């Protein structure tokens, strides 16, 4: 009787991973919204076309920022689903990304924080091109936030390297 209950609980816990599937579906929907914003930015720039170099650079940085966010979403969707829900069975599809199925939770954390640092860096660069629109305290806050992301990334990478070294010593 107790063994049957234990098996039921274990099966229920294992099946509970499927509760994450709607989260990943929601991220797929957010990828469509991001695409709409990307297209809107292109249409806005075309309709207000300017030969001003700063405006062009800001436009390009905005598109890069949005594409980084999209890349980040794909990494989280694929890796998160494969690590926590189920393997994505696309066999040997010619377009299958090489990293797919190889990014573990530690790698996902590092990719996530490095993407956040890159996005934050792009925002900081955009601020640099429009310094007149920000107060000194706002600029310092943006720099502090970016530095916090960089420091967090370095510390996460360092912790992962310590864990990897300790695993090697155990072998």
Image: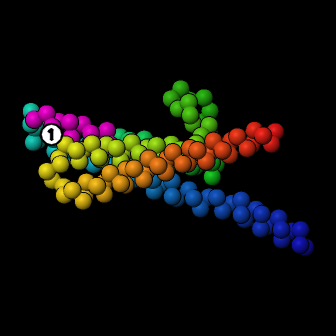
Q: Is residue 97 left or right of residue 101?
A: left
Residue 123: x and y, percent? Answer: 29, 47
Q: Which residue is mark 1?
A: 55
- The stretch in magenta equals 52-65
The relative height of residue 97 versus residue 133 in the rendered view (above or below) is above
Residue 135 location, quadrant: bottom left
Residue 162 location, quadrant: top right
The C terminus appears in which quarter of the rendering? top right
Is 39 magenta? The answer is: no
Residue 30: x and y, percent? Answer: 39, 53
The N terminus appears in which quarter of the rendering? bottom right
Q: Secondary structure at mark 1?
A: helix
Q: Residues within 10 Å of mark 1 (few under 14, many from 20)?
A: some
Q: Residue furthest top?
A: 94
The relative height of residue 16 versus residue 149 in the rendered view (above or below) is below
Residue 51: x and y, percent? Answer: 9, 33
């Amino acid at each position: 009787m107790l063994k049957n209950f234990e098996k039921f609980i274990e099966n229920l816990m294992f099946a509970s991973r499927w509760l994450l599937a709607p989260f990943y579906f929601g991220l797929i929907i957010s990828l469509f919204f991001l695409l709409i914003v990307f297209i809107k930015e292109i249409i806005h720039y075309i309709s207000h076309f300017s030969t001003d170099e700063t405006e062009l650079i800001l436009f390009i940085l905005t598109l890069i920022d949005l594409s980084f966010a999209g890349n980040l979403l794909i990494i989280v969707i694929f890796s998160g689903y494969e690590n926590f829900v189920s393997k994505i069975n696309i066999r040997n599809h010619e377009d299958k990304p090489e990293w797919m199925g190889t990014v573990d939770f530690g790698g996902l954390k590092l990719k996530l924080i490095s993407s956040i640092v890159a996005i934050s860096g792009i925002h900081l660069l955009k601020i640099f091109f429009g310094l007149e629109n920000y107060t000194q305290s706002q600029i310092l806050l943006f720099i502090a936030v970016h530095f916090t992301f960089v420091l967090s990334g370095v510390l996460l990478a360092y912790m992962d390297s310590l864990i990897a070294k300790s695993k090697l010593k155990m072998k």
